Image (cartoon, helix red, strand yellow):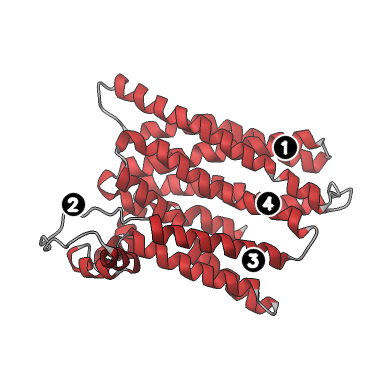
């Protein structure tokens, strides 16, 4: 809602500043209650880029390039839950968890600095009523005003009203061709992220329940989903372009949004096979190779399917593209939190 009224840049900047502040609070928390509160608040604000990315992609790129760039953006937030256990699992095995959070604070600080120095407002107001007086652009003052939200505050009166931005998601979510695909994506994405936590329990538990792996080995297993997401990005990069070009030629220059879902026919068999193999590996104590293959297949499928769903939602409502992240992200994230 704030993004539609005040712009992409100030919302992204302030959300990451607040996320950094609460991450620092979690790193120095003296007790579990304080840490839990800081971690929840950090997660609330740190999730904003997962929605802002889709706004920026649809702002910058035309139709025929959106799926490819959505693929890159989606790869970033799908791979993120696996990077920290992989990178810091080796660290935590030898020192305390505060070092991991301290490095996370440094990384978040670098991100905030890059946003402040390099990020520009991508929102382009095509239909303003009335047309505002043009403002002088360029210079340090304009840069600072755009970054902290002063420019967005001045422009808010020309943009969508509060009633419009609040009711717009409700006007979309009830539509069957959107609601059904959101439920589908929630199940597929949510369970894929949920196993990120449960796998550790099985890998670290003693037989006959688990594999009795140590912290170093468990950290190494997180290379599996990282590589799988990269493979899914490469597959999705070309398969989405192929589907788009093929269907446009077949329909004599007309593109149908539903054709984006063709990629799901590839993703779902991989997803089912991956989860069945992963579950069988834990239940029957199969080799580590079987576990790696199952986990990898599942993550490749999630990567391919998630891009297809986002591209479908964006193309299905071309005049409301920037509303899609408000609806498509909470569905898998809510299930992920439940898991």
The part of the image, by quadrant, that contains residue 141 is bottom left
Q: Residue at x 25, y 24 (%)?
A: 253
Tag in front: 1 or 2 = 2
Left/right placement of residue 6 relative to residue 32 reads left
- Determine the secondary structure under disc 3: helix
Q: Considering only order in the chain, which callout, 2 or 3, is on the residue closer to the N terminus?
A: 3
**Position of residue 278 measured from the top left corner of the image (x, y, whole percent):** 72, 39
* Mark 1 element type: helix
Where is residue 276 drawn, in percent x and y?
A: 69, 37
Distance (Cα) linking label 2 and label 4: 44 Å
Which residue is under mark 4?
87
Closer to us: 291 or 27: 27
Q: Earlier in the sequence, mark 1 or mark 4?
A: 4
Q: Which residue is mark 1?
A: 292
Query: Disc 3 designates what residue?
Result: 102
- Give the distance between the C-alpha atoms of the residues marked 1 and 4, in whole angstroms: 18 Å
Q: Which label's residue is closer to the chain start, 2 or 4?
A: 4
The residue that label 2 is drawn on is 126
Of the image marks 3 and 4, the number of the one nearer the N terminus: 4
């Amino acid at each position: 809602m704030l993004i539609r009224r005040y712009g992409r840049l100030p919302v992204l900047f302030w959300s990451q500043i607040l996320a950094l502040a609460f991450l620092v609070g979690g790193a120095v928390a003296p007790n579990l209650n304080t840490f839990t509160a800081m971690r929840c608040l950090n997660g609330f604000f740190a999730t904003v880029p997962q929605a802002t990315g889709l706004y920026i992609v649809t702002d910058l790129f035309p139709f025929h390039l959106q799926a490819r760039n959505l693929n890159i953006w989606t790869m970033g937030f799908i791979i993120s839950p696996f990077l920290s256990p992989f990178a810091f699992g080796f660290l935590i095995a030898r020192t305390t968890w505060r070092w991991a959070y301290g490095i996370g604070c440094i990384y978040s600080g670098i991100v905030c600095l890059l946003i402040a120095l390099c990020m520009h407002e991508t929102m382009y107001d095509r239909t303003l009523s009335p047309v505002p007086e043009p403002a002088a652009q360029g210079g340090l003052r304009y840069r600072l005003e755009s970054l902290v939200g002063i420019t967005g505050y001045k422009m808010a009166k020309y943009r969508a009203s509060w009633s419009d931005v609040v009711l717009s998601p409700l006007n979309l979510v009830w539509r069957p061709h959107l609601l059904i695909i959101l439920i589908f994506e929630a199940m597929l994405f949510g369970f894929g992220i949920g196993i990120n936590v449960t796998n550790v329990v099985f890998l670290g538990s003693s037989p006959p329940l688990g594999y009795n792996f140590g912290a170093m080995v468990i950290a190494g297993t997180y290379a599996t989903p990282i590589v799988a997401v990269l493979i899914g990005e490469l597959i999705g990069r070309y398969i989405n372009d192929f589907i788009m070009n093929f269907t446009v030629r077949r329909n004599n220059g007309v593109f149908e949004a539903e054709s984006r879902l063709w990629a799901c026919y590839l993703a779902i068999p991989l997803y089912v096979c991956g989860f069945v193999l992963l579950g069988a590996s834990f239940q029957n104590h199969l080799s580590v190779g079987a576990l790696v293959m199952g986990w990898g297949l599942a993550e490749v499928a999630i990567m391919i399917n998630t891009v297809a769903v986002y591209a479908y939602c964006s193309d299905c409502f071309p005049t409301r593209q920037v509303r899609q992240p408000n609806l498509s992200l909470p569905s898998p994230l809510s299930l992920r939190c439940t898991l």
